Amino acid sequence: MRVGFGVTHLVRGLLTDHVDGIGIYTRHLLAEISRQAEPTAVQFGRCDQLAEIRPHFSVPVECLSSGFQAGTALSLLTGRSFPQSQSLQQRLDLFHAPDHHIPRLKHIPVVATIMDAIPLAHPEWASARLRRVKNFAFRRMAQTAERIVTISEFSKTDIVHYFDIPPERIDVTYLGVNPVYAQPVSEEQRAAVLGKYGLPPSFFIFVGTIQPRKNVARILAAHRLLPVEMQKAFPLVIVGRNGWGTDELVPELNGLRERGCGRWLNNVTDTELHALLQSAHALVYPSLYEGFGLPVLEGFAAGLPVISSNTTSIPEVALDAALLVDPLQIDAIAEAMQLLAENDALAADMRTRGRERVKQFTWAACGEKTMDVYRRVAG
């Protein structure tokens, strides 16, 4: 099967050394479908980067030089295929858009992955620049796809509601977890990383881009509610780059170190992150909205007790393997943190549950279910 596979978002992450959740999904899924199909990686725009991009891929890479937004607008206005896609369509059986860059292609079916409905359900969490135009285009281009893939039953429900797409056109394929998170990091490596950042051998950790949806302000407030001695014995480590809409948090994030109650680490390597996760006492991830919640599973794989939200997709993914709290209640987040700090038996039980739960999520299974979608669509 000849599959065009969109990599525009992944390429952006690779070239800026910041591959986020959509990029992780794209990279792993491409590797899995390469075992059973013949994919061609397709990037929209910036074809001058092609030589730099190709070494990152083990499959052929092509570029459509039209900018995606301009090409999308032209497709919507004319009803024609995405500009410059004719030759590509002649050589493909279908196209998969895994990263919300969904081209209109009149001559071959398009499968589109929509992670969540955040831009439409919560526009206040998205960039204000051309927000209405972008959301209109996103919704319309998603509706032109032959089939929609999403990553949880929760997201499917939201997509039906906000995108007005019938549920029978939507398939759920859970994400996988990179096995590297479960591979033990040596004591020497862990000691070196902890020494570099001046951390004790046990702490609370959050991992993710600093943005309003990730609820970092309430995590900081919850940690401050802990007894002072506990704050210092179990400091708070925030791992993630500053995204947008949270500039007021920067002084408080920097203040963690000044108060001796934690660190903000905004530029750690993957190796350092794995060492930090396996040294932490618990992952604190009470996000306000998740289409799936991959960091929760990565915490499970690393052997961490996890505190997360009792809303959106998290209960579906975590089941009883995490302590689920109301993400709007600072007291509830703090109580869960104190409980795990004081109750070693509970922490051990949560580690065991997490390790068992994460076994249900593999990239191989994600790839196989996606191939099933391809087979149905391509006939």
Image (cartoon, grey):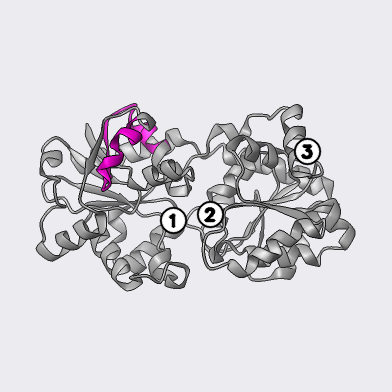
Dots 1 and 3: beta carbons under 8 Å?
no
Vertical side of 349 occupied by 155: above or below: below
Asked if the residue at tag 2 contacts the one at tag 3, i.e. Cβ–Cβ closer than 8 Å, the answer is: no
Name which residue lies at 81% across and 60% down: 259
Residue 81 in the image, given as x and y percentages of width and height: 13, 53
- Going by the numbered disc 3, the residue's amino acid type is Gly
Indicate the secondary structure of the residue bearing disc 2.
Answer: helix
Q: Residue furthest right?
A: 229
Quadrant of res 167: bottom left
Quarter of the picture containing the C terminus is: top left
**Residue stretch rendered in magenta on the structure:** 28-54
- In the image, what residue occupies the spot 31% across and 66% down? 134
Q: Earlier in the sequence, mark 3 or mark 2?
A: 3
Q: Is residue 217 left or right of residue 289?
A: right
In primary-sequence order, the first of circles 1 and 3 is 1
Q: Residue 25 versus residue 368: which sits nearer the camera?
A: 25
Q: CA distance from mark 3 to mark 2?
A: 37 Å
N-terminal of the two: label 2 or label 1?
Answer: 1
Question: Which residue is painted at 79% across and 59% down in the image?
Answer: 258
Q: Compute the Cα span from label 2 to label 1.
A: 8 Å
Residue at numbered disc 3: 195
Which quarter of the rendering shows the N terminus? top left
Q: Is residue 39 magenta?
A: yes
Looking at the rendered structure, the secondary structure element under dot 3 is helix
Q: Which residue is mark 1?
A: 153
Residue 201, given in percent of the width and then of the height, sits at: 80, 41
Please identify the quarter of the rendering in which residue 328 is found.
bottom right
Mark 2 and mark 1 residues within 8 Å of each other at the beta carbon: yes
Give the residue type at disc 2. Answer: Glu
